C-alpha cells in the first residue's frame, strides 16, 4: 500500500502541477516558447519567398537560352547526318546522289526550310526533313556526291544554317570537302 501511494504521488507530480506553484509558471513559459519555436512567423515566410523569387529569376533565363540553342544544334546535327548518309549511299550503291534543300519562303510564309536526298533518277532516298521555323539555309541549293564519295564538280561546298528571330544571330557552317566528300561542322 505504501508503495502504491508513492507511485501515485510521483505520477501526480509529473503530470499534474497544482495551480499557483513555481513549477506551473515555468511550465507555461516553456510551453509558450516551444510553440513559437515550432512554427514560422509571417516575416520569415516572406523572406523565404523573396529568396526563392530571386533564385528563380536568375535561373529561368539560363534554361530558356538552353532551349533556344537546342533547336540549332538539332538542325545542324540532322543535316550533317543526312549528308553523311547520302555520301555513304553513293559509295555503297554506286550511283550519284544529290542532297537538296529549299529555303524558307521569304514572303512571310510559315513553312519551314526543308531538305531531302534524291538519286540520279529523281527518286527520293530520304523523305523531306523540316528544320525548326527559326533555322534557314543559306547558299546554293544542292550538292551531288559521285560514286566514290567525292563531290561531282570537285569544289568544296559550304552550307550555312542561320538562326533567325533570335536576340543574338547564330550561324553554323557545314563544309563538304570537294575531293573526299568529308562533312565537317564549323
Image (cartoon, rainbow, N blue to C red):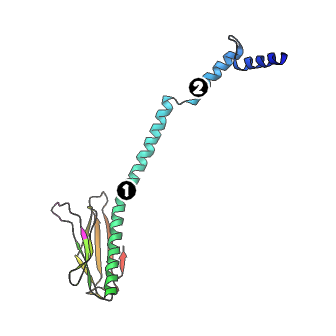
The residue that disc 1 covers is 65
Q: Examine the rendered structure and indicate whether residue 126 appears above or below residue 64.
A: below
Pick whichever of labels 1 and 2 is earlier in the sequence.
2
Q: Residue at x 83, y 19 (%)?
A: 3
Magenta segment includes 116? no
Q: Examine the rendered structure and indicate whether residue 74 appears above or below residue 149.
A: above
Residue 20 visible in this rendered orientation of the protein: yes
Q: How many marks?
A: 2
Q: Quadrant of residue 37?
A: top right
| Residue 13 x/y as whole percent | 74, 17
Residue placed farthest to the front in the image? 1
Q: Quadrant of residue 180?
A: bottom left
Q: Which residues are magenta?
A: 102-114
Q: Residue at x 46, y 33 (%)?
A: 46
Which element type, helix, strand or loop, lies under badge 1? Answer: helix
Q: Residue at x 71, y 17 (%)?
A: 23
Residue placed farthest to the top in the image? 20
- In the picture, the quarter occupied by the N terminus is top right
Tag of residue 35: 2
Query: Magenta stretch mostly in which secondary structure?
Result: loop
- In the picture, the quarter occupied by the C terminus is bottom left
Magenta segment includes 105? yes
Residue 178 visible in this rendered orientation of the protein: no
| Residue 56 x/y as whole percent | 43, 45
Amino acid at each position: 500500500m505504501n508503495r502504491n501511494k508513492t507511485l501515485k504521488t510521483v505520477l501526480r507530480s509529473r503530470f499534474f502541477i497544482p495551480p499557483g506553484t513555481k513549477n506551473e509558471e515555468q511550465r507555461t513559459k516553456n510551453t509558450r516558447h516551444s510553440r513559437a519555436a515550432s512554427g514560422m512567423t509571417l516575416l520569415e515566410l516572406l523572406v523565404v519567398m523573396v529568396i526563392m523569387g530571386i533564385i528563380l529569376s536568375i535561373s529561368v533565363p539560363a534554361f530558356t537560352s538552353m532551349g533556344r540553342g537546342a533547336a540549332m544544334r538539332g538542325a545542324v546535327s540532322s543535316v550533317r547526318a543526312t549528308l553523311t548518309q547520302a555520301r555513304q549511299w553513293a559509295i555503297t550503291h554506286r550511283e550519284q546522289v544529290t542532297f537538296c534543300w529549299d529555303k524558307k519562303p521569304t514572303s512571310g510564309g510559315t513553312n519551314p526550310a526543308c531538305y531531302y536526298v534524291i538519286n540520279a533518277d529523281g527518286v527520293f532516298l530520304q523523305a523531306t526533313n523540316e528544320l525548326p521555323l527559326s533555322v534557314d539555309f543559306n547558299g546554293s541549293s544542292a550538292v551531288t556526291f559521285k560514286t566514290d564519295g567525292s563531290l561531282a564538280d570537285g569544289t568544296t561546298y559550304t552550307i550555312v544554317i542561320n538562326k533567325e528571330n533570335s536576340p543574338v544571330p547564330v550561324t553554323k557552317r557545314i563544309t563538304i570537302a570537294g575531293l573526299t566528300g568529308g562533312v565537317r561542322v564549323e
